[in-house]
Each structure stands twice: as structure tokens, then as C-alpha cells.
Amino acid sequence: MAIIFDKERKTLTLHTKNSTYQMQVDPYGFLLHLYYGTRTEGCMDYLLTYADRGFSGNPYDAKEDRTYSMDVLPQEFPVSGNGDFRSPALIIKNADGSCSCDLRYKTHHIQSGKYKLPGLPAVYAGKEESETLEVVLEDAVTGVEVCLLYGVLPEYDIITRSVKIRNDGSQEFSIEKVQSASLDFVAGRYDLITFYGRHAMERNFDRRFLGHGAQVIRSRRGTSSHQYNPVMILAEEGTTEDAGKCYTMSFVYSGGFLGEAERDQYEQTRIQLGLQEEQFSYPLAPGEAFWAPEVVMSFSGEGLGRLSQNLHECYRTHLCRGKYRDQVRPILVNSWEASYFDFTGESIYNLAKEAADLGIEMLVMDDGWFGKRDDDNSGLGDWYVNEKKLGMSLGELIEKINALGVKFGIWIEPEMVNEDSDLYRAHPDWAFTIPGRKPVRGRNQLVLDFSRKEVVDAIFEQICALLDQGNIEYVKWDMNRSITDVFSHGTTNQGKVLHDYVLGLYDFLERLISRYPDLLIEGCSGGGGRFDAGMLYYTPQIWCSDNTDAADRVKIQYGTSFSYPVSAVGSHVSAVPNHQTGRNTSMKTRGVVAMAGTFGYELDLGKLSEEEKEEIRSQVKEYHRYGELIQKGLYYRLSNPFKDEIGAWAFVSKDQTEALLNVVMLEIHGNMTNNYVKLKGLKSGCMYQDEETKKVYPADALMDMGLPMPVEFGEYQAYQVYLKIK
């Protein structure tokens, strides 16, 4: 069994293949956290220490025992109001205005299979591969009942956490803060790894020592954001890609979030992840319940590489869903950087003809096909086809493109509205605006109030009417601004609007994939502004960044790889000079970088030389050959592009019979030194042959000393080496 209850010691222990997690109900009914780390047996309550700590209060139950304090003890779910002055996971505002909660153990339940969360994305698993633990805590005074949910997937070294809060009292209270997961460590020195960024430069790797005080990452933007990704890694000092102990928390949610890591006065560490508390005040009437979004946790005693692989496997096979979950995605060309808003049906058809000639499998018509939409100042909300612009119906265009043997996809942005639109003129109250104030615009657009069912229903009907017009096999779902002016004209409880907005988004997406089960949806928010595990539940791939520059993408995709599988990363070859940076890189380099993702093109194929077209034909063949290995193989980071002269990564099949090494030279100097790239994950004692040169290499030497990269003249050279066991 993965979950064990020791009745005598009152411990609840969760085992995965390589880790153990343990909590204990103490004599006063408090739920204490004992251990999370390398798999072990026994009771770890010996780790608890007791002493009279000045200014650390004691629960009334402890009477004259001043050595017992919640301000010092490691807790499973710390709350505000019980004497713990560290960051709480839960703040409840009671009917009398007090913020006080005293949760004690009531009961627990263990069952096979993985729990589900109503209206929220979550990791899924069958009864034979997972177990669920529910621990029920209650506040006897107010009737607050908290059910802590734990899902255990032993083979993946994954433990998921969520919280259900129920009002079993007689008066309404409000949730002012809720963190889905909290971890306390009584000892240790740790680095905190987070991923910061901005539009067109997302998920930069940041590692710093966790000293005294709190380090915080958050999004106040209504989405998970470009600025911080909802992922935190706690690594023991000295932990590397291949050695050392590390922990991760990843939030399965697409709205605002708060991540906190704190080292306290007694050298203890607390790390938490959950909902953003600002603009959040969620009321619960008697009998009502609230489910917090899920946090996915994992532990690795073998370094950061294994930690990432745990998440990759879990997300690819137990979070992503649908027809394309296990399939190599179609290679596509997107019209955006080829023509922006300036296109006709005929020019789109011509782009599809070029694609067919090159072996590209799908044409995606991006922004500009609907309403009055020749720039980004009007038309959002009017999801009817501009047949005058296309010169034909959408159905006719799709039929012509399908006749070429090319699939068809389309861009939409359902959550947004322009003031210059028929929808806004008819329903101005459907947008987030504060009465008496002029709204803040973003990209000259406003945000529709998806917390209101009638708004979601109306846009859903429009999008379905669009998708029913022809054989549309792919949708790019965009969201091009942060959320401001949060005020819903459909409720008096404004503190619940932002969370209900995300629930409305999820409802829309769930209904869409239920109605169109074969539809491939790619998430997008100005590129990577909503690249999170929550969206992966509905969209198995996400546009990684609006920045398609190959050199920048090496860094962006490096940061992304710490949590998300390659199969989720939307990555394309674009034109040079690059439209975001002006940088020139070779077609080969752009192809190598884009193959660390779903792979496609974002340029005008008709403007390419014959030599470039021939190179694309070769890339298409290569991706078809290596696609399964790229999508399903184990991913290894072989360099740190924020420090090293190279960006290097590899895909290794699980049976270790083949590997694909990828290297991009990020720096070039006079009298250049050699770079030796050390491979990982090969089968010790075996020989591997380079498919192109036919050279044979011993696996152990490749992993110990590495493979020397050529020293060539020119910037941003790239290399791809396919090795097969001999």
C-alpha cells in the first residue's frame, strides 16, 4: 500500500517508489508534519524538539507547558489564529469579524484511485496506480471543516495536494487566504529556484540561497503570468542536475497565485503555494464548500534532472488528455509572422500550397479573419467570419486547403472584447469595468467577465458556430492582456470574481473538448503568459513564447524544462532577421531549437529560397523520424545557457537504445576553446554509433568526458547528433 496508518503512533505515511511523506496527529489533535524525503520506514517523530521559546505562544490545552508552541512545530496545514506567526496556509474571517481558526484532527479516509476536483483541472490516475488520503480537520467553535486531500502516484514519485473547505456552522464566513500545499522542514540549508520573466522572455532560471525572511513569487495579473511561473523548487545547497536532494511544487491553476518560502528564527524552512490572496475574499454560507486548486509535489534524491523527469512523465501521461496526448503533433505553419493582419483567403490558400509542397501538415490562420478586424483595435467579441476579406466562406477555404492534403487550424481569443465591436455595444456590462471609472486597456481591449455563466454561454455558442463551419482540427486559444478593473456586474461579492473567472474559463474549455474530442487546442497568452499545469489539462501544448528568436528560445525553453514536458512546448522556426530581436541565425539552428518542442513554422514560405525550402523538407523528415523520441524520451539538460557558452540538451529513449544530442553555440571568441558536452542517461558498458559519421563511442566516456563540439567560424552554430546503441 502507498498510504499507511499506524494506529498506535497515529502517523499517516505516504510512500512512493523513492520517497516517503509522513504526518502525525499529536495528543492535542494538531496535525504535525514529520518528514518528506528519501524512502524510509518507521516513525519520524523523533525529529520534533520542544523548548520554552520566548514570545512563542502556547495553546490553552498545553496548560503550563511552555515548551509546546505552534510557532515552532512543523505543521501539515498551518492556520492563522492558533499562535503560529509564520506564514499561514489558511486565513478565515468569521462572521464576527475575527480572523481566527483552530483546526484539530477529526478523521481520515484512505481509498484506491485518485481524487477529483469539481470544476478544476487535476492529475488523474486509475485505481491500480494511485491512492487517495483524505484528512478531515475541524474548528469546533465556528464549524469550519477542512479536508486535506493527498493523491499518491508511487511509480512517478508524485504526491498531489488540495484542500476542501466546508462551512458546517450556522453563520457565513469568508476565506481570505488558502494555500493548497505547505511544507515545513525542521532543519537544512536550501536554495530556492524560481522562474521569472516578462513578455517575450519568460521563465528565466533564478537560484538563490534561502536566507532568513521570506521570498515570494506571485501573480496579481489574473493569469499565471509572464513574470513568474507558478513553480517553486527547494534544493539542498550543492544540489546539481545529477546529485542532491530537491523538492518541487507546481500549481495546477491558470489564475493569480502566491508562492512563499521562509526561513524562520530557528533555522526552519516553510514553503507554500496557492491562490493569490489580494483581491480574494471567498464567502461560504452554511452548507457551502470550496475546493482549492491542486499542487503537484515531487522529491528527488538524485538531483534536479530526475525531479524534472518526474513532472514530465506525470504531466504528459496523467494531466494532458485527449487524442493528441500520446501522438506526435502535426507540423504546422502559422500565418501570423507570415502576413499579420494583411491576408486574404487566396493568400492563406497559397501559404497552404507552399506548406503541402514542403511536407508541412497543417495551416493555421491567425488573427484577423473575423468581424471588423484589420488591426488590433477592433472586432474582438464578434466571432463571425469576414467573408469579404477572405473572398469566400470559411467552409470553402477549409475545403480547398484540405484538398491539398493539409489540415486547417484557426486562432481565437474568446475571453476578450474590443469596445469597437458589436458585442460590446450590445453588452457593455459583460466586460470588467468599475462603475464611474474609465477602464485600463491592454492591447486596446477589455476582458470579458467569465465569472458570469451567461457570458461564457454566449461566447461558447459563437465559437461552436464557428467550429461547425468546416473541418477545423486545431485551435490556438490566445489571451493578450492582464486583468484589471476587476468588477463583475453580476454579483455583489467582488472578492470571488477572479477565481470564478478561472472556473468559467475551465468550464468553457471542458465543454469545448467534450463537444470536439478530436480538436487539438494550443494555449497561448501573448506567448507564455499562461504556461501552467492547469491549462495543460485542456490544451496539451502551449505557445512557449512570442519570442521565436532561436538564441533566446534556448534560455526560455531551458527554464520551461524544469517543470513541463517537451510535448507541451509550442516552438516554431521563424523568419530572420527575427521579428522580436532582429537577430540572424541559420535555418539549421532555428530547426534544432524548435525541435525541442511541438515543432512548426512561423514565416512566409513563399519568400524562401529553394535552398531554404530544401532544408525545411529535410527538417520535416527529421522531425518525423525523431518525433517519438523527442516527445516520449527522457529529457536531459546538459548545460546551463545562462552561464555556459553552449546550450545543450538530449533526449534518451527509456530503453537507452537511442539518444538525440542537441547543441547550440551561444558564444564565439577568437582562438575559440573546445566545448565537450557530457551526455547523460546512456547505458553503461555499451557502445553508441553516430548515425551520420558512423563513428562509435563508448557510453561511459561520453558521459564522463563528453563529445567535443566542432570549432567553426560564425555565430550560433548548431549540431544535432543521433546516437544508437551498437
Image (tube, rainbow, N blue to C red):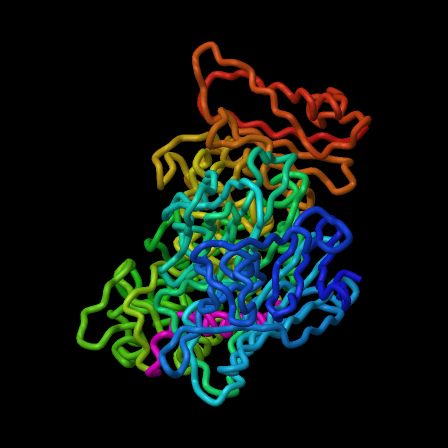
Camera-nearest residue between 266 and 146: 266
Q: Is residue 462 above or below residue 675?
A: below
Q: Is residue 632 above or below residue 454?
A: above
Count of numbered badges drawn on the protein: 0
Q: Is residue 287 above or below residue 214?
A: below
Q: Position of residue 717 (x, y in %)?
A: 50, 25
Would you say 263 lies left or right of 648 here? left
Q: Is residue 115 above or below residue 267?
A: below
Camera-nearest residue between 44 and 161: 44
Q: Position of residue 333 (x, y in %)?
A: 49, 49
Which residue sits at x=49%, y=75%?
464
Most distant residue in the front direction: 64
Camera-nearest residue between 714 and 282: 282
Q: Position of residue 19 (x, y in %)?
A: 71, 50
Which of the image's four quarters has the C terminus? Answer: top right
Camera-nearest residue between 61 and 409: 61
Q: What residue span does the magenta drawing correspond to?
A: 490-517
Q: Could you tell me if residue 365 is visible in this image? A: no
Would you say 547 lies left or right of 558 here? left
Which residue sits at x=79%, y=29%?
684
Q: Quadrant of residue 4?
A: bottom right
From the image, give the main secondary structure of the stretch colored magenta.
Answer: helix
Q: Position of residue 350 (x, y in %)?
A: 45, 51
Which of the image's four quarters has the N terminus? Answer: bottom right
Q: Is residue 532 magenta?
A: no
Which residue sits at x=53%, y=37%?
593
Q: Is residue 497 magenta?
A: yes
Which residue sits at x=45%, y=19%?
668
Most distant residue in the top direction: 671
Most distant residue in the bottom direction: 170
